[in-house]
């Protein structure tokens, strides 16, 4: 099977900017391009194959026609486990929380959501919320939502390009203004909005909050792992760093100075999202050109793959149990 370039689905949420179109050349004419769903089989926004034999086919259609491209490690999941996004937050996102699998399956009939953020770029001084800054009770949490003081008990973290935040289900969080993120998450769209700064939606009405459900799932003690800086290890032709890992996905960053070699075995596919630079990805069957903002899908059992050029790539795969 050949390496496939992907075309994302787009979202025009009110807090979005235009960097995904202006900087990453995304073919979207929305006034605001908040998110591009780079690798997605979710019905709320499916990505597609771009070019070649399967041009225009959704990832769902492609995976159903060729399940072997996923690899052995993906077979233990009921559905494709990963969703990858690029997110451009010109304004801050709402303070929100995601439920666990158990809670989401019972109340929403879909899986919960653990995710991680890789800070691609940000304005000087930009920050985000990650968990609470001290232990609080559910009663205090509710009161602070009601009297608009919930931000006072959240952990505000200043961010820099290359920072990593691993957000387990139940962790309160919000991306701040002026941040461009690569998000790797469970294949779910289940979000409970806690606080939205009094903003109005496109219909002129306050956006819906989900306070009772948020109270039921939120972890009200400080979270660990805020703003970790990954350890860089030299490899031939560049460097590599492990960004995060859970049962749903494993994420690495590869910095290519000239040429690196990757081995894509039978256990899992590999996706590569270019967050900087450009180059070529060369497999046994074909070569794909890429630039910053592009995502490619490499089928499981492809074997040796060479990446040439000068770039930074976020690589996602699914490890065995």
Image (tube, rainbow, N blue to C red):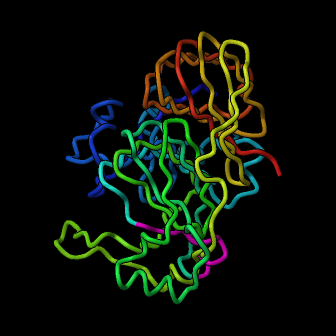
Instruction: Count how many numbered circles sit on residues in the image.
Output: 0
Report the residue at 53% width, 82% height from top: 215
Q: With 136 as the anchor, is 195 left or right in this view?
A: left
Quick check: can you spot residue 111? no
Q: Residue furthest right?
A: 321
Q: With 148 as the anchor, is 257 left or right in this view?
A: right
Q: Residue furthest bottom?
A: 139
Residue 260 in the image: state x and y as whole percent. Answer: 67, 16
Residue 202 in the image: state x and y as whole percent. Answer: 20, 66
> Is residue 309 shown above or below 74?
above
Q: Is residue 102 magenta-colored?
A: yes
Q: Nearer the viewer, residue 201 or 79?
A: 201
Q: Nearer the viewer, residue 307 or 87?
A: 87
* Range covered by the magenta-colored residues: 95-106
Quick check: can you spot residue 106? yes
Instruction: Give residue 230's quadrant in the image.
Output: top right
Residue 303 in the image: state x and y as whole percent. Answer: 74, 24
Q: Is residue 127 magenta-colored?
A: no
Instruction: Give residue 282's quadrant in the image.
Output: top right
Q: Residue furthest left?
A: 204
Report the residue at 50% width, 53% height from top: 157
């Amino acid at each position: 099977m050949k390496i496939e370039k992907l075309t994302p689905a787009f979202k025009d949420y009110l807090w979005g900017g235009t960097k995904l179109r202006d900087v990453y050349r995304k073919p979207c004419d929305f006034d605001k391009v908040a998110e591009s769903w780079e690798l997605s089989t979710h019905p709320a926004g499916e990505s597609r194959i771009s070019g070649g034999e399967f041009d225009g086919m959704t990832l769902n259609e492609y995976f159903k026609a060729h399940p072997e491209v996923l690899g052995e490690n993906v077979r233990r999941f009921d559905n494709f486990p990963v969703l990858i996004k690029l997110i451009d937050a010109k304004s801050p996102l709402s303070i929100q929380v995601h439920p666990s699998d158990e809670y989401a399956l019972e109340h929403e009939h879909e899986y919960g959501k653990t995710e991680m953020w890789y800070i691609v770029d940000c304005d000087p001084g930009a920050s985000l919320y990650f968990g609470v800054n001290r232990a609080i009770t559910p009663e205090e949490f509710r009161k602070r939502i009601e009297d608009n003081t919930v931000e006072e008990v959240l952990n505000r973290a200043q961010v820099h390009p290359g920072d990593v935040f691993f957000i387990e289900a139940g962790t309160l969080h919000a991306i701040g203004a002026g941040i461009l993120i690569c998000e790797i998450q469970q294949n779910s769209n289940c979000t409970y909005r806690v606080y939205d700064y009094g903003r109005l939606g496109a219909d002129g009405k306050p956006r819906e909050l989900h306070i009772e459900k948020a109270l039921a799932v939120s972890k009200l003690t400080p979270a660990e792992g805020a703003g970790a800086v990954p350890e860089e290890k030299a490899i031939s032709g560049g460097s590599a760093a492990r960004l995060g890992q859970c049962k749903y996905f494993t994420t690495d960053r590869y910095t290519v100075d000239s040429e690196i070699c990757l081995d894509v075995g039978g256990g899992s596919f590999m996706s590569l999202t270019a967050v900087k630079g450009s180059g070529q990805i060369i497999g046994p069957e074909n070569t794909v050109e890429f630039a910053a903002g592009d995502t490619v899908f490499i089928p499981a059992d492809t074997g040796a793959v060479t990446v040439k050029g000068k770039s930074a790539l976020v690589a996602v795969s699914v490890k065995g149990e």
